[in-house]
Amino acid sequence: MGRADRHCIHTLISVNFITQVQELSTITWLSVIYLAVLSTVLANVILYLLIGNRLVSRLSIQLYIVPLVSLVGGIVLLGEGVTILTGLGAILMFTGVALATRKN
């Protein structure tokens, strides 16, 4: 391990970092768990289960749904506001996925 690597690890696991982690609020931990479990792990598990039944080229389009799951999490867990542009963006993403995966 080089000097730069040791410095990077030392910086990452510093006393200040540990103190900041200990001071995180419950909502922050719930947000981290949500991002790790629901919008990443669950989305990938569903994707790989579907790969066994469908063409990968058609399933890759559905990865565009992951940001929508994150959007819902932000609204529910963090109380983020929903604007007209947010709703329009979600509708456009769903429309794009529907059009790309429709049967000819």
Image: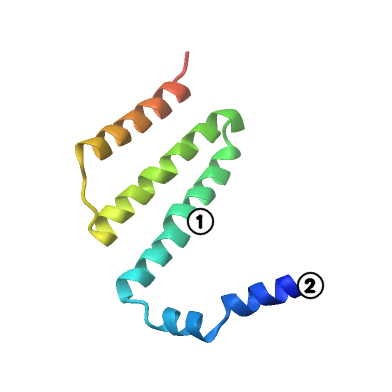
Tell me where residue 96 appears, x and y as whole percent.
Answer: 40, 26
Which structural element holds mark 1?
helix
Which structural element holds mark 2?
loop
Q: Residue furthest top?
A: 104
Q: Is residue 14 left or right of residue 77?
A: right
Asked if residue 22 is positioned above or below residue 48 in the image, the reply reads: below
Q: Which image quadrant for residue 6?
A: bottom right
Type of the residue with mark 1 = Val
Q: Looking at the image, which residue is at 26% across and 53% down? A: 75
Type of the residue with mark 2 = Gly
Q: Looking at the image, which residue is at 41% across and 21% down? A: 99
Q: Which image quadrant for residue 35?
A: bottom left
Asked if residue 44 is positioned above or below residue 18 in the image, the reply reads: above
Q: Which residue is mark 2?
A: 2
Asked if residue 77 is positioned above or below residue 93 in the image, the reply reads: below
Q: Is residue 1 left or right of residue 20?
A: right
Q: CA distance from mark 1 to mark 2?
A: 33 Å
Q: Is residue 3 left or right of residue 57?
A: right
Asked if residue 83 is positioned above or below residue 77 in the image, the reply reads: above
Pick the residue in front: 68 or 19: 19
